[in-house]
Image (cartoon, rainbow, N blue to C red):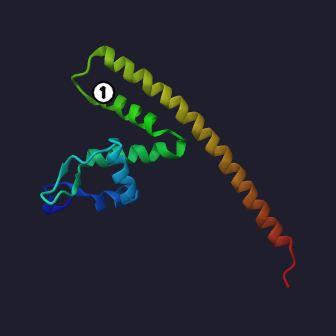
Amino acid sequence: MGADTGGFLQIGQVAERTELSLKTIRHYDELALVQPSARSSGGFRLYTTADVDRLLLIRRMKPLGFTLAEMKQLLDAIEVLDDQATTTQQRAAASAELLIYKDKSHDSAERLRRQLAYAEEFTDLLTARASATPRQ
C-alpha cells in the first residue's frame, strides 16, 4: 500500500487491482455500495483492503445480472454476518438472504454457461466455414 497515504490505496491503485474504471468506482461511491474508508488532506478517496474486497465482490455480481439494489442488500447481509455484535435473529435473516442470492447466482451462472456454449458453437461453425471456403 502507498507509503504516503498511511497504508491506504488511492483510487487509481484500486482501479488497477479491481479492473474497474475510476468512473465505476466513483459511481459505486455515489450509490453508497462502496465508500472510501478515508479521504486524504486534499480530499482524494482512500481505500482499505476491505474496500477493495467489497469492490471485487460487486465485480463478481455484475455479470450475473444482480441489480444495484440487490448488490446493496447482499453486501449488507454479508456485513451483518461479519459483525460480531449481530444477534442470532439478524444472522439467521442475513443467512437466509444469502441463500436466495446463492440460488440466483447459480441460475445466472448456468445461463451464462449456456450462452458461452452457443458462442463457442458459433465460433467453431465460422472457423469450419472459413476453412471450407476456397481462397482466391
The residue identified by callout 1 is 80
Q: Amino acid at mark 1?
A: Val
Name the quadrant containing residue 111: top right
- Report whether 108 appears left or right of 32: right
Q: Position of residue 44 (x, y in %)?
A: 21, 58
Q: For numbered disc 1, what is the local secondary structure?
A: helix
Residue 52 screen position, x and y as percent: 31, 49
Farthest residue, direction bottom: 136
In this rendering, is residue 36 above or below 124?
above
Task: Tell which residue pokes out farthest to the top in this image.
Answer: 89
For the point 73% across and 61% down, the residue is: 123
Q: Residue furthest front?
A: 30
x%, y% of residue 67? 49, 38
**Dividing the image into 4 quarters, which one contains the C terminus?**
bottom right
Residue at image location 30% in from the left, 15% down from the top: 88
Image quarter (top left, top right, bottom left or bottom right) of the N terminus: bottom left
Q: Quadrant of residue 94?
A: top left
> At 68% across and 44% down in the image, what residue appears?
114
| Left or right of residue 122: residue 11 | left
Q: Is residue 78 left or right of residue 40?
A: right
